[in-house]
Image (spheres, rainbow, N blue to C red):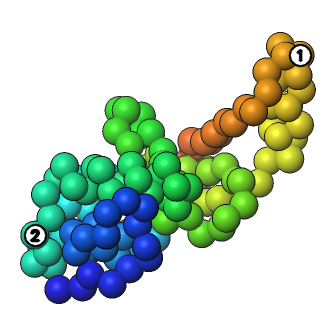
Amino acid sequence: MTTAGPPVKGRATRQRAAVAAALAEVDEFRSAQELHDMLKHRGDSVGLTTVYRTLQSLADAGEVDVLRTSDGESVYRRCSTDEHHHHLVCRVCGKAVEVEGPMVEKWAEAVAQEYGYVNVAHTVEIFGTCAECAAAGS
């Protein structure tokens, strides 16, 4: 049973550490249910509610990226950078690439100023088909 992992905001428990460790082991986005299944197969006894709460804590702390799939499900992945970024996501295989968007940043700032908003934040995800899936005819 592996419980070592990055610190998790909130009460430190074996279960929360197991969720953080599982996230650290995967590169692609995973749903709470997928992470829960992964933990069960490893022998970690962690409830699905704990998985959801831990993921929310990590998201609130900015330690994980969160995307909404086309069916509305949230999926999570450890951030590979501390910098603000966006994602280019393959609709077929789920591969995600972190991208910078300086033009998006300027546009978001201009829109906020135009309407008198301050302390604004935004997320941008671009969905398409990656080169590998396109070549495979998916």
Tell me the kind of residue under disc 1. Glu
Look at the image and tell me in which quarter the N terminus lies: bottom left
Q: Is residue 8 above or below residue 76?
A: below
Q: Which residue is mark 1?
A: 114
Q: In the image shown, does 92 or 100 lie closer to the viewer?
A: 100
Quarter of the image for residue 35 reads bottom left
Residue 45, disc: 2
Q: Is residue 14 visible?
A: yes
Q: Position of residue 90 (x, y in %)?
A: 52, 51
> Does residue 132 appear anywhere in the picture?
no
Rendered residue at 36%/70% (across/down): 20
Observer-nearest of 87 and 45: 45
Earlier along the polypeptide chain: callout 2 or callout 1? 2
Q: Amino acid at mark 2?
A: Ser
Q: In terms of depth relative to the viewer, which is nearer, 90 or 23?
A: 23
Residue depicted at 33% across the width and 57% down the height = 54
Rounded to the nearest angstrom, the CA distance separating label 2 from label 1 is 51 Å
